Amino acid sequence: MEFISVSYTLSPPSLRGYLIDSEFIKRNNNCRVWVTGVQINKLQVPALVKNGTDEFIILDCDYNLSDTEKEGLVVKWFFNGSINPVYQWIPPKKPQGLGLFASRLDLTYKASEDPYKMYRALRILRPSVELTGDYKCRVSTFSSEAYKSAAMLVY
């Protein structure tokens, strides 16, 4: 069996193809070129939380990224449509809690032992009614970005 190395560049004017599960496929007679990006597999945000009953809750943002996309990885969480994040993690640095969440997060919590996923989740301490709202997880790299949102009601 013989392998051939091919270099292929996509430029916006010639971008013709179609999307399958958020992946762009470029067709050219006998070949397909898959242009993939970071993808969020599952966003876990509890829909309902009873005030004063939980010591902590976990909001998790599980994602996939290829080895070539690990460079420039940034995970941010946003609250109630704000443009300012309440949480940010840029590997290999430690995560940061910001704004209203600065004193409400357990920044040592690890959702995974994978060095590119370990601090993807929020562990919110003592959830209370002021944390009711919409949560958005945004995962970006130098080459792509993905986000998902979910609502949580603390009653």
Image (cartoon, helix red, strand yellow):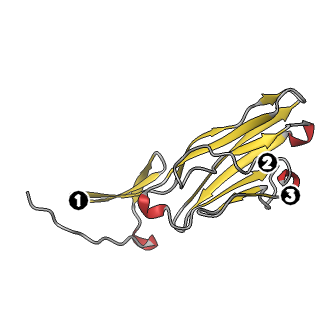
Mark 2 crowd level (few <14, some 14–19, many ≥20, 10 Å Cα): many
The residues tagged by marks 3 and 1 sit, at their Cα atoms, a distance apart of 53 Å
Q: In the image, 132: left or right of 65?
A: right
Residue 32: x, y in percent?
29, 56
Label 2 amino acid? Answer: Leu
Q: Amino acid at mark 3?
A: Gly
Q: First in sequence: mark 2 or mark 3?
A: 3
Residue 70 position in % (x across, y down): 50, 62
Q: Which residue is mark 1?
A: 29
Residue at 74% from the left image edge and 42% from the top image edge: 123
Of the numbered discs 1 and 2, the one sitting upstream in the chain is 1
State the image quarter where residue 49 is shown: top right
Mark 1 residue type: Asn
Residue 105's disc is 2
> Which residue does the image show at 82% across and 56% down from the upper left?
82
Secondary structure of the residue carrying tag 3 is helix
| Residue that badge 3 annotates | 99
As drawn, is 112 to the left or to the right of 45? left
